Image (cartoon, rainbow, N blue to C red):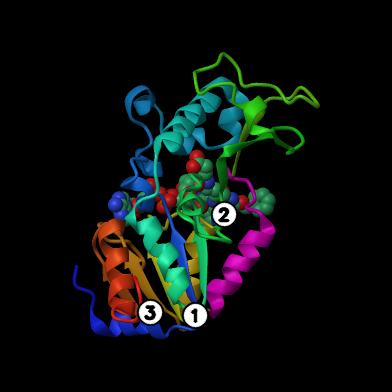
């Protein structure tokens, strides 16, 4: 895809780039976006109604089994060209802070270092009472549906995925680092997110208020991003990100 030269220049010249990713970046790895994660058996449920502490308290097996299904999808998925483009961006940019709302670990698997995972990691499991992370092998005997979640070996409470549900606090140090980066960056990339879930959704407006240029990568229009310093690449992440990195550093080493 064609990247406008002024946009390529802003990315190339930025002292600090922030990239915030959402479920759309992993869509082309075969993982349904969060608001589409209701196919097959799960079509009767809204993801928003399963990702809550109240849903887990009401029906722990239902919520556990939905996450077991999603873990099986993550195990089968591979990072895609957009994840790898962000690895290359980190190699070329003066500084990159990579923040993700995704729980799939695909940035780490692609080779990105120091990823700020705001909403946790679906492959990690913790005690629902004490919050202690429990060894993944004991906690996931299989991804098959269970009649009840496995129990914490220490206290006997149910285990749950180590992800942030609605109404729960994000890890405070990660949120603080992400907010500081958004407030100080020159270029903020918003990639494959609907931008409706807070506090992650406050990072883009924070970057704009602080004077950064914003680049929105999404095949659909993203509400609330109309601004003179906002660029819209209305395309899939695998199309837009490799093209952006190529345009910014073309002829300046391997991209
Ligand atoms: C493509 C593509 C392709 C497709 N290429 N793009 C302020 C105002 C209003 C409400 C609130 C507020 N502050 C807090 C709230 C409440 C709530 C909230 O935000 N609600 C809103 C829905 C209104 N927030 C919270 O409850 C947060 N907690 C909190 O604030 O706690 C306060 C507290 C403090 C102290 C003590 C206690 C409490 C927690 C939010 C946690 C969100 N967790 C989830 C689940 C994680 C686990 C899991 O995955 O199951 O995180 S919800 C879900 O949404 C998930 C995602 O990370 C997150 C964002 O979704 P995302 O990534 O944007 O996905 P989609 O599906 O929405 O969009 C995909 C996009 O990709 C689309 O735009 C497509 O077009 C695009 N796309 N193909 C590029 N190929």
How many numbered discs, if any?
A: 3
Q: Main secondary structure of the magenta part?
A: helix
| Label 2 C-beta lies within 8 Å of the nearest ligand 1 atom | yes
| Labels 2, 1: front one | 1
Which range of residues does the magenta coloring cover?
164-184
Q: Give the spatial CA distance, label 2 vs label 3.
A: 24 Å
Give the residue at mark 2: 118
Q: Secondary structure at mark 3?
A: helix
Q: Secondary structure at mark 2?
A: loop
In-image side of 232 versus 205 (left or right): left
Residue 208 position, x and y percent, is 44, 77
Q: Quadrant of residue 9?
A: bottom left
Residue 250 position, x and y percent, is 29, 78
Q: Between disc 2 and disc 1, whose residue precedes?
A: 1
Q: Secondary structure at mark 1?
A: loop
Q: Give the spatial CA distance, label 3 vs label 1.
A: 10 Å
Q: Which one is in front, 23 or 168? A: 23
User: Dot 3 surroundings within 10 Å: few (below 14), some, or many (20 or more)?
Assistant: many
User: Dot 1 surroundings within 10 Å: few (below 14), some, or many (20 or more)?
Assistant: some
């Amino acid at each position: 895809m064609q990247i406008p030269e002024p946009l390529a220049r802003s990315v190339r010249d930025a002292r600090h780039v922030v990239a915030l990713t959402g479920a759309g970046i992993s869509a082309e790895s075969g993982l349904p976006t969060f608001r589409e994660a209701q196919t097959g058996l799960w079509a009767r449920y809204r993801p928003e109604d399963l990702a809550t502490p109240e849903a887990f308290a009401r029906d722990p097996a239902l919520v556990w089994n939905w996450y077991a299904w999603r873990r099986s999808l993550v195990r089968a998925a591979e990072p895609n060209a957009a994840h790898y483009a962000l690895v290359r961006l980190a190699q070329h940019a003066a500084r990159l802070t990579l923040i993700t709302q995704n729980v799939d670990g695909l940035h780490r698997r692609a080779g990105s270092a120091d990823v700020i995972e705001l909403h946790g990691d679906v492959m990690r499991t913790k005690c629902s009472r004490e919050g202690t992370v429990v060894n993944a092998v004991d906690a996931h005997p299989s991804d098959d549906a269970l009649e009840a979640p496995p129990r914490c070996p220490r206290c006997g409470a149910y285990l749950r995925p180590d992800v942030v549900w609605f109404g729960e606090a994000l890890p405070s140090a990660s949120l603080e680092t992400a907010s500081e980066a958004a407030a100080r960056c020159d270029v903020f990339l918003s990639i494959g997110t609907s931008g409706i879930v807070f506090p992650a959704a406050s990072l883009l407006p924070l970057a704009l208020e602080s004077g950064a240029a914003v680049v929105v990568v999404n095949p659909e229009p993203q509400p609330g991003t109309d601004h003179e310093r906002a660029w819209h690449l209305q395309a899939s992440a695998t199309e837009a990100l490799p093209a952006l990195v190529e345009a910014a550093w073309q002829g300046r080493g391997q991209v």
